[in-house]
Image (cartoon, rainbow, N blue to C red):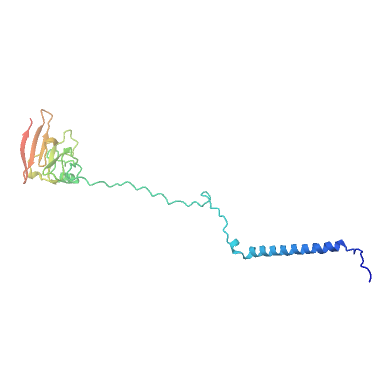
Amino acid sequence: MPAASTDLVKVRCSLVWSRHCGVRRSTRLAAAALVAATLSGCGSGDSTVARTPQPTTLPTTSARARVPGPPAPAGVPPSTSSAPADPCATNLAAPAIARAVSELPRDPRSQQPWNPEPLAGNYNECAQLSAVIVRANTNAQSPNTRAVLFHLGKLIPPQEAPETYGFNGIDISQCTGDTVALVYSGGIGLPSVVKFRWNGNGVELISNIGG
């Protein structure tokens, strides 16, 4: 029986390395394929990743569209209406005065009508007796004057009252709700004051003061 050979068998190192490296390369390729498959599955099918909310940047105040506010309400115009005049207050501009004066007989001296604008008076609609002083509507230097008497704001016809020609003023301090104090001043001496009163049925003269 031949003796076992002790000669070394020469093996090409490149062949051994190739096989060894081939095993390692195959292992690496398999691992890379597994990782790629895993990443591919996560990228396309993992709903958790797809639904993860992204941070949202809210627009700042300056970036938001500015919506104009409602227009300012228009100013309320001031009220032009005034409270009704007190009928019991003296009112020398009452239309009833002009109407009454237009009904008077003409001035006997000038034959002119009477000026409806009172020179003085205490006319009001609540007094039992009130009066106004008017003058003849003439350009004379000293026109004639007279008193016009009223009961509750209504004209007392001249024929139903004492004569009132020549009176040119009224003393308000001596007047009451049913009495008027008419003044006559001729420029000489003290003025005369004559009081007239409403007695419930008509006008009566009650006193004559002065001189």
Residue displayed at 11% across by 34% down: 183
Farthest residue toward the bottom?
A: 1
Query: In the image, residue 155 lies at what x, y percent?
Result: 13, 46
| Res 207 quadrant in image | top left
Residue 120 on image: x %, y %: 17, 37
Depth order, front residue of 58/80? 58
Task: Judge from the rendering whether residue 112 lies leftward or rightward of residue 78; answer left or right.
Answer: left
Give how far across and how far down residue 147 sits, in percent: 12, 39
Q: Farthest residue toward the top?
A: 189
Q: Is residue 113 above or below residue 20?
A: above
Residue 11 x, y percent position in the rendering: 88, 63
Nearer to the camera, 196 or 57: 57
| Residue 27 picture quarter | bottom right
Q: In the image shown, does 38 or 26 lie closer to the viewer?
A: 26
- The answer to whether 126 appears left or right of 75 in the picture is left
Q: Is residue 96 at least partly visible in the picture?
A: yes
Q: Which quarter of the image is occupied by the C terminus? A: top left
- Could you tell me how many numbered marks the image carries? 0
- Answer yes or no: is residue 135 visible: no
Position of 150 with respect to 66 (left or right) is left
Work out which quarter of the rendered image holds the N terminus and state it: bottom right
Q: Quadrant of residue 101?
A: top left
Residue found at the very far right of the displayed protein: 2
